[in-house]
Structures are given as structure tokens and as C-alpha cells.
Image (cartoon, rainbow, N blue to C red):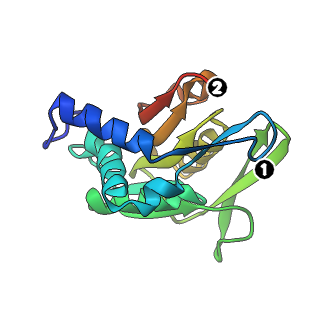
Amino acid sequence: MKASSAMPSSDRESGIVKLEDLIRDVPDFPKPGVIFKDITPLLADPAGLSLAVEYLTEPFRQMPVDVVVGAESRGFIFGTAVARNLSAGFVPIRKPGKLPCKTRAEEYVLEYGVDRLEIHEDAVRPGMNVLMVDDLLATGGTMAACCRLVESLDGTIIGVAFLIELSFLNGREKLSKYPIHSILKVSRE
């Protein structure tokens, strides 16, 4: 998986540093002991946003992507932009009760309870090649649920892409059967 317009290593490294500089750490949010990775400064920076989307797109440019799937809500931001770059469609996965037509649902475990995600039953047709995109890989629970939804519709997941991976939380383990691409890896809290 090599991008047709691969950039030199030094340019990529300076781009990674730029992205890291645009992400703000917010201590004790949403609860004490958590350091929240706030991407809003990156989203507000035109060059940073463009760079992040390009880095998310790169590994998949030569792959046959029919649709990009993103989970509510920041997966929508990056997923639609990546879909545009790949000339693919976009499919949202939403919280319960937000989609107007017949849906399929998947529950997943959070550290403080259970949540549920939904997708339109006709959003992914059997055999479609699907790229999954979100802003953050933490424990992997949300993306694993998203992947189960796509597979329940007989979609073929060709990759999973994240802007940030909190590698110390081992979220990759829940997604080990898929090719995973993450731009920024955080190895400690």
C-alpha cells in the first residue's frame, strides 16, 4: 500500500510534528486522570486539517474503496474528507435513534456501561470494499462495534484508519484482523 504521491521522509516527519503541535492535551477531561486529546485546534487550522486528511488517505489511494464509514461524530469529519479524496461514498454510523430508515444496531462495552451504534441496513451492500475512519483509537471498542455492523451487512473491510492512536490502551488488539493505519501514536498517558 504505497501512495502514488508519497512524500519524502523528512517532509512527512515535519508534517507529523505540525499535527502533534495542533493537538491540545486537556487534563482531567472528561474525568479525573484522563488526558483528553483535543483536535479542535487542528480542525481550525486549514493546513493542519488538509495534512491530516492527506495522511489518512495516503495508504488507500491505490485500493478499491467503495465507501468510507465513520462513526459519530468526529469520524464524520475525517471520513467524509477521506471519501472525497478517494472518490468514494460516505456512510455514517450513528448513536441510537438518529437515522431515519431501517437500521441495524450493535452494542459495545464502555468502561462505565454499554452503548449502541446504528447503521442503515441498506448503507453497505454485500461485497462493497469499506474503509473505516475515526479520529482516535483508544480501547478499540467503538471501532470494533462499527466493524461488526459493516460485516453484518456483508461489507469487506479493507482497512481502518485513525488520526491518533493511544497505543498504551492496546485498542489494536480488538481490531487485529484488519490492516490498521494511524498517523500519530501516543505511547504513554
Q: Decide if residue 155 is in sight here.
A: no
2 vs 1, front mark: 2
Q: Residues within 10 Å of mark 2 (few under 14, many from 20)?
A: some
Position of residue 41 in the picture relative to residue 32 (left or right): left
Q: Which mark is residue 115?
A: 1
Q: Is residue 30 above or below residue 124?
A: above
Specify the quadrant that holds the C terminus: top right
Amino acid at the residue labelled 1? Asp
Find the residue positioned furthest to the right: 113
Which dot marks residue 102?
Answer: none
Kind of residue at disc 2: Leu
Residue 150 lies left or right of residue 43; in this view the side is right
Residue in the foreground of this view, choosing between 140 and 136? 136
Viewed as shown, does residue 72 lie left or right of 52?
right
What residue appears at the point 78 percent right and 39 percent down from the top-left corner?
Answer: 109
Q: Position of residue 90 (x, y in %)?
A: 43, 63
Disc number placed over residue 169 in the picture, else none: 2
Q: Nearer the viewer, residue 82 or 37?
A: 37
> Which residue reaches farthest bottom?
100
**Marked residue nearer the N-terminal end (2 or 1):** 1
Image quarter of residue 78: bottom left
Q: In which quadrant of the rendered view does residue 96 lie?
A: bottom right
Cα gap from disc 2 to disc 1, whole angstroms: 19 Å
Residue 110 percent location from the top left of the image: 78, 40
Going 60% across and 29% down the picture, which residue do you hit? 171
- Provide residue 149's location: percent of width, then percent of height: 60, 49
